[in-house]
Structure formats: C-alpha cells, structure tokens
Amino acid sequence: MPVTYRLDDLGWYEFERLIQSLLKVRIGVGIEAWGGTGDWGRDAYFEGELNYPSNTPSEGPFVFQCKFVEQANAAGADSEDLVLNAVRKERRRIVERLADETWDASPSHYALLTNAPLSPELRLKIEEVLSPTIGEGTIHIHDGEDLCGWLRAAPNLVKSCPQLLSLRDLEELLSDVVNAETITRSQATIALAQAESRVFVPTESYFEAREKLRLHHFVILEGPPEMGKTTIGRIIALTQMSDDWEALEVREPSEVLRMHRPSKPQVFVADDFFGRTEYDPTAVSRWQAELAHILPILDSSHWLILTSRMHLLEMARSRLDISGQHGKFPDLSEVLVNASALTTGEKARILYRHAKASLSTQSARDMVRQVARSVVQNRHFTPERIRRLVSEVVPRLANSAAIEPKTISDEVTLAITNPTKQMRISFRTLPDAHKWLLWSMLGSSRHGSVTAKPDDIRGSFERFCPQDKHRPFDEVLAEVTQAFVRRDEWKQWLTIDWIHPSCRDLAIEELASAPSDRRRFLSACSEGGLLLAISVAGGRGERNVPLLLDDADWEAFAESADTTMQESPFFASALYSSFTALEKIDSPTQNTTQAVERLSSLFTQRFLPSLSRALRAKAFDHPISLEVFVRISEKLGVPVDLDLTESWAACERTAVQWEQSNLSPWEDDTALSEVTAFISAVREHLVTSFEFAARSGALERILSAITSRATREADADHTFDEMDDDDASSAGRTLEEMSDDLKTLSDLEGIPHGYAESLRTAASGFDYLVVELNDRVPSEPDESSGRPESDDREIDIDALFIDL
C-alpha cells in the first residue's frame, strides 16, 4: 500500500498528537502523558488490558513509542540510523525505569510507530536491539505505510485532527469518503478552505465551536480581524465532509433556506454576515428577518456557522434577537465563541505549521527557529500576521547577504507589530492600474468580495481605470494575486477575494487619501461603492464615512446615488439603513454629524423626488422601498405625494396570472408573496392609496383572484407519493409561507369580511398539507464533537522547532 498521507509534513509534535488520536480511535487507549523530546522520540506507558495488537484482549503493560523522522520519505532519504538511535535510547530508558522501580514489570508489548519506511532488514535490527530488554514481551513495528492504512480506515479522525486535510491531495481524500454529488455542491467551501488547511492548528476555539454546534447546531465565531475565525468555520465545514456532509458557503440568509435539504447532512458557513469590514445594517435586517425561518430547520445534521468582527456584532446585538424568535433556542451568549484567545502552545504550533508549509530553504527555516520564541511571545501575534511574516518577510531576509542579527530581530518585530506599514509601502509602489483593480473590487460587491468568475469584476475595472493608466485586466489580476487578493480554485469553480480583510481596509484608506481618485470612484460606482462611502465602523471600528471628505466628494456621491436609486428603488432602503446607523453612533464626530445633515438634505431635495418618480411604476416590485419612502418623508417633514395607479395595475395582473396558473402551489409561490407584501405595505404606510384601490374595485379584483386560487388548492386532493424527502420538505416550507401570506392578508384592516373568512379557511387547508409533508421527513442521529479528552499543554518552543 503506498504512503498516501504525507506524514513528513507534520513535524514531531503534530505527529505525536496524531498518533495519540489514532490509537484512541483504533484501540480505545486514553494516552494522556508522553515523555521525552522531539530529538529522539515520544513514548507512553499503559497498564491494563487492551485489544492490541488484534481485536482480542491482551494483558499489559504496553509501551507505545513515536519516532518522527524528518523527510523520511524524501527521495534518497536514509532514516535507518535515526530510527535505530531512537530505539537504543528507548531501550536505555526501559532499563532505567525498571531499575528505579518506576515500572513494576517489563512491558508485555512494545510498539514502535514511525513515519519512516522500514525495510524487513531494519525491522530485524530493531527487534535485535530491544529483545534483550523486552524479554518475553512482544515487539510490534508500524511504519508509515501501516499508519496510512489506519488513517484511511478512520475517516472521522479528521474532526479531531484536521491537519489530516493537508496531508493528502484533497480531492483524492474526499473522494474516498464523500460521494460525487456532495463534493460538487460543496465546491465553494472546499476551494476557500483548501489553502487554509495546509497551516491550520485546531485551537481551543475550534473545539469549543464544535461543541456548541453539537449542542445547539448553531455558532457565531466572533473576534477581531486576523484571528482566524473564518478559517475555523471553514475547516469545521470541511471536516464534516468526512461523514458525507455537504459544506456550503452562503452570503445571504435566503441561500440557507434555498439550499437546505432535510435528508442530507449539511453545514452552512456565512462569513462576515454583518458586513466585511464595516457595519451593514441591511445585512442585520435580512438575517433578523430570516432567522425565524432558519432556526427551526437546524438540527443534529444541519448546522449553521456565522462569523463576525467583534465591533460589528456589538453594533448588531441590539437589533438581533435569536431566542425570542424560537422558544427552544438558547440565548445569543450561549452560541458565541471568541476566536481571539490563543495559548502559547497554539501560537507556537501556528508559527511552526506556516514555516513547515511555506519555507523551502534551510536558511529561511533556521531564521524562523532563531526568532520563534520572540515571535510567539509578541503580544501582537495573530495568525494572519504570521502568514505574512513567513511568506513575505522571512524569505526576503533569508536572501539578504550578511544581515545583522539585530536587523533580523527589528524587521521581524515590525512585521508583527505593524504589518500595515509594510503593506502600505507595497500598495503605494503598485502601478496605477493595479491600484484601480483593487479599488474596483471595493465597488463590485457590498461584501467586498467576488464570489464568481474574474469576469464579474472585469466590468468594474474597465469602468474605473483611466485609459491612460489602463493595462490588460488578466495581466493586472495575475500580478496582484497572492499579494493583495487570492484566487480560490476547486476544479471549475473560481473566486477572487481579498487575501485578508485587512488588505481591503488598506485599499479603502489609500483611496480615501487620494482626492482625484476618490472622486472618480464615487462618480463611477454603484450600490456597493456608495454604501461603502457612507459606511459605519469600518476597519477595526474606527472608520466612519471613509470616502466623503469634501464638497466635491458629496456631489459625486449624490449624482451616482440618484442614478442608482432611479434604476433600483431598493437602494433607498440600503441608503436609509446606513443613514439611521450614522444617526445612532454613540460618540459622533464632526464628520459623522455633517454626514447626517448632508444626507438629510439630499433626501429632502433630491432623493425623495427621484424615488417618488421611480415608485409610481415600480412600487409593486419594491414594497420595502415604498415603506422607506414614507418613513423618510415623515421623518423629514416632507409631504407624501405618490400615485400608485400603475403599481396597483401590476399587482392585479400578477394576481390574475396566479389564479390562472396550472402549476402546483409549491412551484408557484412568488406571486402570492409579492401581492401580499405590496398590499400590506400600502395598507400600513399609504392608507389613502389603499382606500382608492378599494373604491376603484382594483382591490376586490385582486382578492377575488387570490381567494379563488387559494380555495381551489386547499380543497384539492394533492398527492405527494412521488416526492423524495428533499422535495417534500421544500414543498412544506413553501406551503407554510403561503399560509402565512394568506393569514396576513385576511388580518389586514379594510379587507372585506367575506374575503377574510375565505382566506383564513384556505390557510387552514394549507397548514394541513404542511403537517402531512413534514411527517414524511426523517429525523437524523446525533453527532459527537470529536473533541479530544486532553487539552493541549504548553509547549517547549525550542524543542518544537528543533526539526524545522
């Protein structure tokens, strides 16, 4: 059997932890204390009875020795002397322990476990060395090939040892235990987590998050930037795939509902769900609205992982209610995990894993070993800063001729303490086209990332970049990749994203400091860039209204916002949410106070008239914008003057088309929700228009069409025998939402009594169908967390790095 896991990539400490976990899985032994240091091997003594070396119980004592050999499987490697030297030292330790009566008896079983390949001749030599000491005991030897076989037989081990994800080709590893459809549906998460798995260290936060998911099926990973909360979420999702779970990356709460499959275990990951680097009040509203529907579908086989920067979560807490929406769900504090706390041992392992994965020259590795202690003890340590240190700073220093030790120390300290300074220097040396590509990313998406092909930001780049600075998009993209952005690929799936949110912070700050570029950006950007311009609490919570610094900025912003609002009235809702977020700042500055005043004036003089013109024909498609229009008008004391005749006509056409449709109701739910949302918004916010529709007969014609179809469907003999569990669950959710819509309409003041009664009766019929469908969905078994019994102890840093 070939060595399918690259065990050489681990290092002695991670190899020891892997063997501990592997022995526990294979023979149930709870090894907690190991002796020795990394230069000769690790051993553990176990008394009692074990099902080892076969499934039949054997009497102890047992000695298990780990011996990691650096590059044991490299071409031309000769590990024989290293292995024999470790065995000889172990023999002396056995003799000493028997002599001082640390052990009562010589071991009945001695097991050597190593990553090195052992030839038949070497196995004989090992036995010759140990036999005189072991006496009648039995010697068992397991080399790299044996261990790889064990690992292949224990796919769930990856949950407690996620380092395994980096030791084999990920596609090959997953294909061993996951069906092809699951891999296909999980491609986005796989692509995003693939690079992170190479350096990931399972911290206490990782295991705490797994435990909360086991208990509550939901966790929010909070913390400042650069602490690895996103990586923790994605690695958890990737490890669940060992049980054939789907791992799904989502941006919007609606995607959770759309992709949910009750018969298939799934874990959903929503990164920066309240905003990427600045507070997004509209995102809070969307999650608040949908959590009532999401929480009931979470169970032991359906998990939701959310991440948020700490200051953004604090801003959102006052608006985010979890337990109030679902009686059996815990308080928000019960599902929070702070990802920022790292032990000294965890920091040392993170530095080691990065160096092991990234550094190819011995001089660079020697440099890391020299500075390891000071790096680990630096109070500014974060996983992202270590990535930059190892990938950028150390190789540059290692290539410098005759560099002084103090210079090395100063450079390393600066890289950890103030990495933004180095990033800023790099940014400012970029050609203009490269800067515009990065600034184009700021305006391409509200979340500051592109979750599709590179072509999705190509258009922004072509629009933003001046012609005299222009260079081919693909060429520029290639040159900023790995420095500021990354390409995440999995088979045919590709995304472009910031290499870290701090790079996005830097791009915003640099754009803000360039007046002419800032105005060009504001003049050409659409919704994403405009909301960034007036965003709240960006970066680490210290950046508000970052791109509106003078009158020229505001004029460019107003022009673009006006155009965007006319094309998409929903933008008014997002803009108003940002406006109210600015108003609620606890300690407003002169800049934020002026921003509130300017936005108030713009809404009164410019935006409300534009929105009024847009809503005359588009209010039916944008009922939320209708609500915003009325609220802003009332707030600013502007008379509400809105003729919705065209929108009522659109509502009537939709209702009649729904009545005449031959589709099953669960395949044709959009029309009902649109009609309900529009009529409800008008009744609540524009009573005069509602009364006009009632007098003109438009409202009765709409209700007649809706009631006719709803009554027909509620009385029909629907059969669900041909549905699988996924389809049944989806249909059940759709019918439940339609029932809620019918009840909402029936409860509106001003709805004629006869129609209200018919709508409530139809809703009851839909509820009966929902119960019938839900009874078909099977329950799922519980899931253990994979948490190891013993915590990670503090590490001797010098010993850890001895084999780097």
Image (cartoon, rainbow, N blue to C red):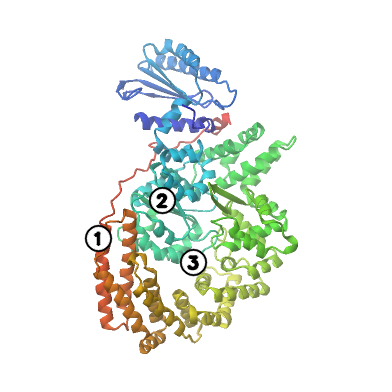
Q: Distance between the residues labelled 2 and 3?
A: 25 Å
In the displayed structure, would residue 556 be above or below residue 196?
below
What secondary structure is marked by label 3?
helix
Discs 2, 1 touching: Cβ within 8 Å: no
551 vs 46, left or right, is right
In the displayed structure, would residue 604 be above or below residue 160?
below
Query: For the point 63% across and 50% down, which residue is it?
Result: 481
Q: How crowded is mark 2: few (under 14 residues within 10 Å), some or many (20 or more)?
A: many
Q: Distance between the residues labelled 2 and 1?
A: 26 Å
The residue identified by callout 2 is 267
Point out the tag, 3 or 1, that comes first from the N-terminus.
3
Seen from the viewer's position, the closer of residues 104 and 330 is 330
Q: Nearer the viewer, mark 3 or mark 1?
A: 1
The residue identified by callout 1 is 772
Query: For the point 56% across and 37% down, which residue is it?
Result: 352
**The disc label shown at residue 27, or none:** none
Number of labelled discs?
Answer: 3
The residue identified by callout 3 is 281
Q: Position of residue 98 (x, y in %)?
A: 40, 15
